[in-house]
Image (cartoon, grey):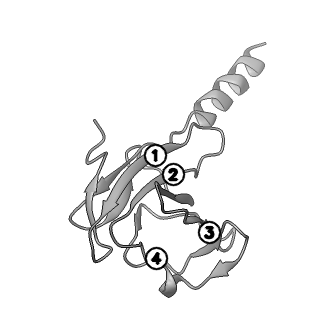
Amino acid sequence: MKKIFLILTTLIIVSCSGNSVYFDLQKKNMISCDNLLISKVKVEGLGDNFDYYVFSLKSNNDIGVKLFSLTKISDAFSISTTSGKTINNSEFKLKPSSRYKISNISSGDATQFSITIITNENGNVVKASNLDCN
């Protein structure tokens, strides 16, 4: 009975990892609040912007990153669009004067955590909804 309780407790602790993140506006990085690695990110355009991208690790050998940059996508990630088309990392750019919802979906058993960002006329992120973990 103790073994079953120990196994169940371990599974609950392991499965309760979070997807909480914040956005470093100065460096344009999404960073985990739980010190967990980021391995899958969804970027959705809001309003009139219908962009939709999923950033996934290319191989199971990579375990993720501590911070996810929107200005220089790590070579460990591949990018797919709504239609399933894969695009080169160097081709990814945020649209000017747009709003995006960025979701950390790395831990499949945890609730996804999202940040809203806004770009200026040059496509640079100028505002973000979560600037810290609080």
Q: Which mark is residue 21?
A: none
Look at 38% across and 50% down and name the residue there. Answer: 116
> Is 2 above or below relative to 95?
above
Residue identified by numbered label 2: 104
The amino acid type found where label 4 is placed reads Ile
Look at 54% across and 66% down and name the residue there. Answer: 51
Q: Quadrant of the C terminus?
A: top left
For residue 26, what is the image quadrant? Answer: bottom left
Which is nearer the N-term, disc 3 or disc 1? 3
Residue identified by numbered label 4: 73
Which is nearer the N-term, disc 2 or disc 3? 3
The amino acid type found where label 2 is placed reads Asn
> Is 26 above or below relative to 103?
below
For residue 16, what is the image quadrant? Answer: top right
Residue identified by numbered label 3: 57
Q: Quick one: label 4, few (<14), some, or many (20+) residues within 10 Å?
A: some
Look at 31% across and 46% down and name the residue there. Answer: 129
Residue 110 drawn at (x, y percent): 59, 37
Q: Quadrant of the N terminus?
A: top right
Task: Determine the CA span between mark 3 and mark 1.
Answer: 19 Å
Look at 57% across and 37% down and name the residue there. Answer: 111
Which is nearer the N-term, disc 1 or disc 2? 2
Q: Is residue 17 left or right of residue 60?
A: left
Which is nearer the N-term, disc 4 or disc 1? 4
Residue identified by numbered label 1: 114
